[in-house]
Amino acid sequence: MSLTMTVKSFLFTLFMFGLLHSVKAQTTVDSSIALIKRVLPAHAHRFRVETLKSTKSTDRFELESRNGQIILRGNNGVSIASALYHYITEYAGGQLTWNGSNLKMPSNLPMLKHKVIKETPYNFRYYLNYCTFNYTMSWWDWPRWEKEIDWMALHGINMPLAITGQEYTWYLVYKELGFSDQELKNFFTGPAYLAWFWMGNMDAWGGPLPLRWMKSHMELQQKILTRQRALGMKPILSAFTGHVPPAFSKKFPNAKLKTTNWNNGFADNYILDSEDPLFNRIGKMFLKKQTELLGTDHYYSADTFNENEPPTNEPEYLGKLSARVYDAMHQADSNAVWVMQGWLFYADRKFWGKAQTEALLKSVPDDKMIILDLAAEVEPIWKRTEAFYGKPWIWSMVNNFGGNTNIFGRMEEAATGPSKALQSTQSGRLTGIGLTMEGIEQNPVIYELFTANTWTRDSINLNEWLPKYVRNRYGTVNKQGLKAWSVLRGTVYTVPKDKYIRDGAESILQARPTLDSTTQWTKTKLNYNPKDLLPAWHALVAAADELKKSEGFRFDLIDVSRQVLANYALVVHQKWVTAYRAKDAQKFKLYSDEFISLIEDMDGMLASHPDFLLGKWVAQARRWGSTDEERNLYEQNAKNLITLWGDKDAILHEYACRQWSGLLNDYYKPRWTQFFSALSLDLQGKKSLDNKAFTRQIKVWEWEWVNARKDYPVAVQGNTIDQAKKIYTKYSKVIDGSYQ
């Protein structure tokens, strides 16, 4: 080893010692006081923090007033933060969400008449999905992560998935195995696709990934873990599942490899068979290196077949495979616990019958594996697997797929699902609840509601909970606001039991131009009648003057207005499609122009709110780059993920679509404009429409857009309330009449 490498290793060891020492040195009280100062800086001196020694394994907190102060007690930082949030929501009328917060506390903080004691029935409160790290978090920096970790603690999260920067650990492991940087260029994906790289679904797409990115995100991960652990969280890190670089067969020609394909239009990738001795060796190397870099809390995520089928459905094979995956963890960490996403049992239910599922799970000791029932609000897998055959498991809710911006949720299931499972005699070792959405920063009510389950065994009474949520959100009781939310509860946030609707509908505006309103990734089927949503829109506009200072209200007003217009687009779509098929050129021109105007108006309205700006997403991506080459790569990744999700022939196009200002005017509108030009030429008898030729043309245009260099506004334009009122004045009567 060179002197330079020795010095580097020594400095790194010192750094890690300092990092781990700082976690130990920062007490629960210290970290809790720091959180209070971040959340309520003007009132932090009014709170006193005390630790609570608990003889039980479950978390608990106490809350009381004494000598003009509010006393927060808990057995760890998360419990203390939960006590603070309980005080904020139950006594001070406040709220903290991704989309608007109300933390304007009364100058004289309310005192409690009686001590409050809460204990959770859920040992684990899990948070995040691999996909969240890209659909929402691709470009997050430390200040944004700091806010999210505070949100986690306040909402009782104690088991977050923590995979930021994982690629750097893999880089170091494969370098130790003799791979060159050139050989690894065809392995790591671009920053916006790392989730699917981590899950073993794809290689290289959107890359090559700069080493500077890997190092910077390992540093970010170290900050994330330091803060999470200081608050008492137990982060879940990664383990090896066999995913290896394409160059692996050249480096190890006798290795037992198999190719897999995610079946979404990307190249094969390579999985090292768990029978190969290299599997155990690399698995141990990875955990050892990861522990050197990050420490460990002994919880590891490993998903052997995420949307990939095993080579055989023989139970014996599947049992041995899972035993070997666990053994690789166990040999590196004798306290290792495997945390497995249960998505495979949902996504490929035909393959995973009783024998296959039981074999995969029972080959690992019961106390060394935890299963996430990933979409229990849609299809509870625990009910058809005898509660995962004795394994501890977590009742989880997905709610959002792709980070789409539609208003959607199963409010009733979020309020009652965990409690019903907890009290069922068939639920086995239910040990936690979890949020596993693919994207966040939308539908805040669903996540506030779900996390309210943390400190109770009982179902949540929505008739009591929802008015309190609205009061906290808007800072006052407003009849029109309450009316709006009563409507929202019965429409966008209710899914009829007799309909299978997995997630929210998109708008036809976002579809690749078509005469068909049921295209694969632009589903327009709603879980409610669109006209039934209109009273919520009317009520929110009526409340605007009184509630205009509320952050939460401004978001809700824009969001509901956006949803109403997004739904109405289908009505206009049907009008111009009908006119085109009837060969009525005049009406076609009228309605196609209206369709384009609708896109423009939505874009202008959304430009007035910071949560709906394409410019922020692109600018945040570019900010991570240190060279023009890196900045352009990150911009391409950012734009590609939310549009094509691949190359010009991508299967997943529109999967992660967004209704954002900038995207509407610069991407969706030009596509439709080109389509209308083609239809007009057809109606004029100048050139017959060739749908296949047009699709080829538009694919080329989309790919050029994804790769183009362009800045978009990062600051809001116009006043949110004024823009919403302007849209309402123009469209309310028209839309009301359209549904008669």
Image (cartoon, grey):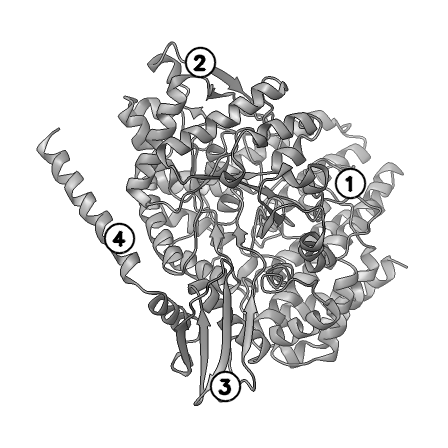
Instruction: State the SS at label 2.
Output: loop
Amino acid type, residue under disc 1 in the picture: Ser
Residue picked out by circle 4: 19
- Nearer to me, 335 or 159: 335
Residue picked out by circle 3: 109
Q: Earlier in the sequence, mark 3 or mark 1?
A: 3
From the viewer's perspective, is 249 left or right of 524? left
Q: Residue at 30% of width from left, 22% of height from top?
A: 179
Q: Residue at 28% of width from left, 27% of height from top?
A: 175
Q: Earlier in the sequence, mark 1 or mark 4?
A: 4
Provide residue 515's location: percent of width, then percent of height.
78, 37
Q: CA distance from mark 3 to mark 1?
A: 53 Å
> CB atoms at circles 1 and 4 under 8 Å apart?
no
Q: CA distance from mark 4 to mark 3?
A: 37 Å
Provide residue 154's location: percent of width, then percent of height.
50, 65
Residue picked out by circle 1: 517
Amino acid type, residue under disc 2 in the picture: Lys
Instruction: State the SS at label 1.
Output: loop
Q: Residue at 78% of width from left, 32% of height from top?
A: 682
Residue picked out by circle 2: 256
Instruction: State the SS at label 3.
Output: loop
- Nearer to me, 248 or 455: 455
> CB atoms at circles 2 and 1 under 8 Å apart?
no
Q: Earlier in the sequence, mark 4 or mark 3?
A: 4
Q: CA distance from mark 1 to mark 4?
A: 54 Å
